[in-house]
Structures are given as structure tokens and as C-alpha cells.
Amino acid sequence: MDSDAVENSTLFVDEKFEFPENFDDVDSISSTDDEYDEFSTSSSSSKVDSSSYQNNTGDETSSSGVEIDCVNSLQLWTPEVPDGLKPVVGQMFESLDKGIEMYKKYAVIAGFDIRLSCVKKNKLKDIILRYVVCNREGIPEPIQKNTLDSAKKKVRMTSIHRTGCGAGVKFKVCSDGKSFILYDFEEKHNHCLFDEDSKHMLKSKRKLDYSQQRFILKMSNANIGATQAHNIICQLKGGYDRVGGTKVEYKNFQRDRNCYIGDSDANLFVRKMNNRKLYIPNFSFEYNSDGGLLKYAFWADDTAKHNFQEFGDIVSFDATYRTNKYCMVYVPFTRIDNHKNCVTLGAGILDSEDGNAFKWLLEAFLKSFGKQPKLVVTDQCPGIKQAVREIFKESRHRFCMWHISEKLPAKLWTSNGIIIDCLTIRQKTTLPKLLTPLPIELHASKIYTRSVFKDVQNEIYQSVWSCFQSSMTLVDGSDVIVIVEKKKIQQKSTDDHTANASSYIKSIEQKVTHNKEHASFHYSCLFFHHYGLLCRHIFCVFKNLGIEEIPTKYIMKRWRKDLISSELLKKRHWDGEANEHLKELENDAQSIFDDCLGIVVNDIKKFETFVSKMKSLKTELEAAGCTVAQKGKEKIMESLLGVSKPDTVDVGNPKVGVLCGEYAFHDSRNCPSRAEEEEEEEEE
């Protein structure tokens, strides 16, 4: 920008605003820039008589110097700031941003907030003049009241914030058109400043940084609200003064996130699932919309498909209500894994519980997994019964107990990847306590999961202390071994006045047939056929034959430790965005910092060195301009949520009630609001 352009510049401001002849005396705002979102901006008047507002300075105290203006009879506060940090008239800056950043840092040390005031631009819309003032500059707008109009919105009474403070700085562009010079600086304030113990309540200090926004979002994903999230972060950081934001800022961020989502909830859900389908291998997602509104959806990841491959012989699913504000039916598909925990094979949401909805859901399930389960366990819902009969023609359908809808959701959360991952790590790094000296018990502890091994261990223990071999005969080339089990039977005897319990030992015989040619065992109790685990009678035979390891053919794959890869569990935390590497770096940075903290926490000198290096690194990054604050709210929300907001809504949220405007399972005929209106009409 040349000097001629500056001289022939025009103003790009509100048409209603008129600048006086001497523009340098104007302290009111005409426009703001979006990149300075950390400053509050609002209209105010210039050169006011601040004598009537000098007492409305808030509750904060200050150690700054105080002097009396004898002409106007005002108290003036001068910030006590080292000379090297004070603004100096004639100071040059490479850009306007660096000049504003300098004054912002000065304001934090001095104990007051700043905001952007008036701006002047040339014909090319380049800024050539900018005022930055104290946040208490100007006078409060008068409150309008009308006692005759009861329908008018009630005005909330608030404390006076503006005091007509004249402190601030003024920048103007230099002849090169790029750098700026500070040509005016007013240091004194007509209100007291924040002291050192209260500076964390400054607006600039209460602004949430990226880490706090990320923390609030993660707490929200764990069903922890903004208030509880603020209490948690205060405990983690050691006090409210170290957090940088109050509960109000935390709740406001939740509000901003909800406003960002708005009516695009269903659309963002579909876009995020499609992103996962695009970036995550073997991820399935299907949905159905009618009239632009979301009706059905189903999804399953690679871990769910692997679980179905190993444990999908029996599948259970049931409709669950009240899991979302749209009153959609949540349908999880579950099965028991090798830890005897419920795992999710897939999930769907439906707008109704009729036969067509469940038909679509089972078709989506069949498309994702490619085959039907052998057995399907559900409740007695007619819609489910009809859908299973038509879609899963090769599966057997059995009804479950009526209370499965209560127990299943409660146990479903045990499929959480963290819990399963902890179980996998624990069983790989530790061995359970053995009850017998038999080598076969040690072998069983190495191949079975911890929960399954407890059952196998009990059978091995009983084979030693409760079973013995009574006879062995040769029949058709196979050894027929008779095992006698001593079992304690409890018996109760009652008379007219007392109830005595007694017990006796009962001998139970079981036969085990050993075919040496095929190295196979057959037994009469059929325990293996029912549970997939060897019984105590077989282990008694193994003990007598000196077999130290369980034959491979009698180890079911579904009960092994190494069945589920740990890499599959990690995929459940993927969002599927292209910047997945960035999220991994964020998690690594947090983990490394926590590890370093644990290393130096017991050594004061190392701790001081660590903190000093962290401060130096922070200063270096700030000097390099590495900051997220320059992004707008839209970009920050996109980064945190992992999905961008579309310009147009392709898939709308489920419909609401016509009369009440709420998401609920009723129509206009039986709407509760209609009944209330009818009652009011009858009373009138």
C-alpha cells in the first residue's frame, strides 16, 4: 500500500456513525475483526464525563499507584508495570497483530481487560488506523422500561461495568504500508485494577484454550456435564486460579457446541459415519431416510465383525428406549466373548418398532456380516418375530426372559474396549494362583482367559480330590474307564419345631472311553458338548495316563487368550478423519508429559529444571506464532468434533410433534399438550 492510497483513503464503517473532524479524539468502535475473538467488542460513546461512574468499579482491588485529578476531582490508577513492558510512543511493530498482542500482555500484567475500538480503512479495505482501549471505556446504555406494557420482555438488572475509562493505545500504518507505529498511549485508569490474586478472573484469562475445550468434549463423551468437568479440572490442576475459566465459560462452550450442531445433528451423524466408512478398513454403515428425515441406521466396525466370526453362533438383540433425545429405538446386537462378557456385534437406531423397521435392520446386519447366526435370542416383540422369520431363514429363533431388556443394557457396557484391553493385558502379564502341582493346570492357565480358567481349574481340582479310577476294561479296541466321583449332598430334615440340615457322600459313576488309535476320549456326562470345556472325569483320566497338556482338539478357539488382537481394540477409538495422526500426537504428548511429571516429582531440583524448560518451550512456540486462538469457532468445533458442518442439510433430524414440538412417541390425537388445552378451555 503506497502513501497516495493512505492519503486518499475512505472509511468503511457503519453508515449511522459519523467521525468528527479530529479523528484522533474518537474512542468509539466502528467495526471489529473476527480474528480478535479474545477481545470483547461493543459500542460506546467517546469523551464522556466519568465522574458519575468512578464508584462503579467492581469489587477487585489493586496495588497500583493512586493519584487525584484536582481538575475533575477523580481518582486515577496507574498500573505498576516494569518500564520494559510498558508501551512507548513511537514504538514500531512489524504488523498490527504484534502491536495488539504487546498491549494485551501489558494489560494482563497491569490487571485490566482490553477490547478493539474504532478502525479506519482505505479504499483497498486495508487497516490504516486502529484504537485499542480499556474494556471499561464508554458509558453504559440506558435501560428502557415501560410499566404500562406488561407483555414487554423483562430487563434483567445487572451491575454497571463501563466507567468512561480513557486508557488505551492508538496505532497507525507507516509509509511502507505494512508496519505500524504506536503514536498515542494513555496509561491512567479511572477505576481500580485487578490485583495479583484476582488476575485469573480477567476476561482474557478466562478464555478457554484448546486443551480445555478438548477436555470438556471428552468429559461430555463420558456423560459428564460442564459443571462436573470444571470441578474435575480444578482438582487436577490444583485450584480454580489455575484453570483459566469458570463454570460459566465451560457451560458456554457446551452451548456453543450445541449451537454449532443445531438442526444438523442427524446430518453430522451420517457424515461422521461415512467418514469412518471411508477411512477405517472393514467399517460398515447403512442408513435410510424418508422425506429428508433419518429413519433407520446400522453400523459395525472391524472388531464387531471379528467378534461375530468367533462368537456369532448365538446372537441376542433387543430394543432399548430413552437413549437419545429423538426417542429413537436403540437396538444393540450382543454375544458372550472369551472373557464371558457381553460384546457388541453391531448396533442400530430405528424411528419405530414395527416389522418393516426390524426387517431393514436385519437386512443391514446381513449385508455387513455376510452370514446368518445359528441361533437368535430376542423378546416376544411381534415385529422382531416377523423380521427374523423372513430375513434370518436359516437361523433358529428362541425367546428370552422378559427382564433381558433390563439386564442386557446394564451388562452391555462391559464390552468397553478399555475393560477388555485391561483384561487382555492382565492375563498376558500375570499368572493365576495354581491349586494343584499338575502340569496340565499350568498349561490351562496359559491358554485360557482368566474367567474361563477358573472353571477349568475347578474341574482339575475336583479330579484330584473328588474322583478316582475304579476299573478299566477293553471293549472293541478301546479302554472303557469307570470314574467314581464322591459328591457331597445336602439334605434338610424338618419336624414340628426345628429344621436340621445334614449331609452325606454319594458316589456317582461316569464312563470314559479312550480310543488310543485316534487319541480321542468320549464320556457319558457330555460336559464338553454343553459348555465346550473338559470335565473332572477326563482330567482324572489324564492324571492317571500322565498327560501333561490338554490336547489341541479339546481346546475351543473361542476360549483362548490370543483370540482378539489388541490392534482391533485400538480401532474402536478412531473417528476416521484424515487427521487421525494429529489426534495420536495429542494423546502421545499428554502421556509423555504425565510420564515426565512422575519422574521428576520427587526431586525438587529436577522438577524446577523441568518447569523451566517447559516455560522456555512455551515462549518459543508463542514467538513462532503456533497458536490455535487465531482460528474461528467454526474451525475449532470442526477440529474437536471430527466432522465439518455441511452448507445444506441432506438428512434431517427425526420429526417432532406438531402440537408440542417435542420428540415423543405420540401423534396430534393423543398429545399431552392437546389434553392440557382442552382442560383449560373447559375451565374457562
Image (tube, rainbow, N blue to C red):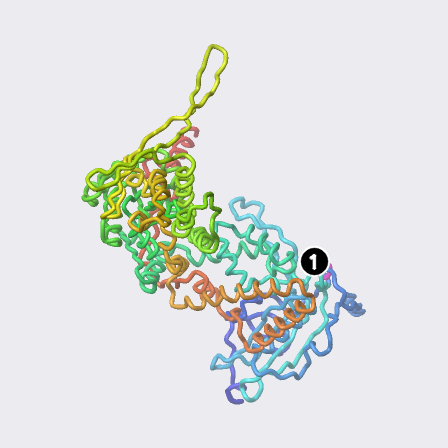
Residue 127 appears anywhere in the view: yes
Q: Considering only vertical position in the picture, is 97 above or below 285?
A: below
Relative to 594, 302 lies left or right: left
Q: How many marks?
A: 1
Q: Nearer the viewer, residue 462 or 18?
A: 462
Q: Nearer the viewer, residue 165 or 237?
A: 237
What secondary structure do most residues of the magenta stretch adopt? loop
Q: Is residue 55 magenta?
A: yes
Residue 542 in the image, given as x and y percentages of width and height: 35, 44
Q: Secondary structure at mark 1?
A: loop
Residue 265 in the image, given as x and y percentages of width and height: 38, 54
Q: Considering only vertical position in the picture, is 181 above or below 351?
A: below
Write down the region rendered in magenta.
53-57
Relative to 453, 42 lies left or right: right
Q: Considering only vertical position in the picture, is 118 above or below 538?
A: below
Q: Is residue 513 magenta?
A: no
Name the image quarter holding residue 70: bottom right
**Quarter of the image that includes the C terminus:** top left
Q: Nearer the viewer, residue 57 or 83?
A: 83
**Badge 1 is on which residue?**
58
At 35% from the left edge and 32% from the top edge, which residue is drawn?
484
Residue 10 in the image, given as x and y percentages of width and height: 51, 80
Name the image quarter holding residue 267: bottom left
- Give the amino acid at mark 1: Gly
Relative to 274, 492 lies left or right: right
Relative to 626, 82 lies left or right: right
Residue 27 appears anywhere in the view: no
Residue 385 in the image, given as x and y percentages of width and height: 24, 38
Q: Considering only vertical position in the picture, is 152 above or below 636?
A: above
Residue reaching furthest to the top: 496
The 10 Å Cα crowd at callout 1, few under 14, some 14 to 19, many 20 or more, is: few
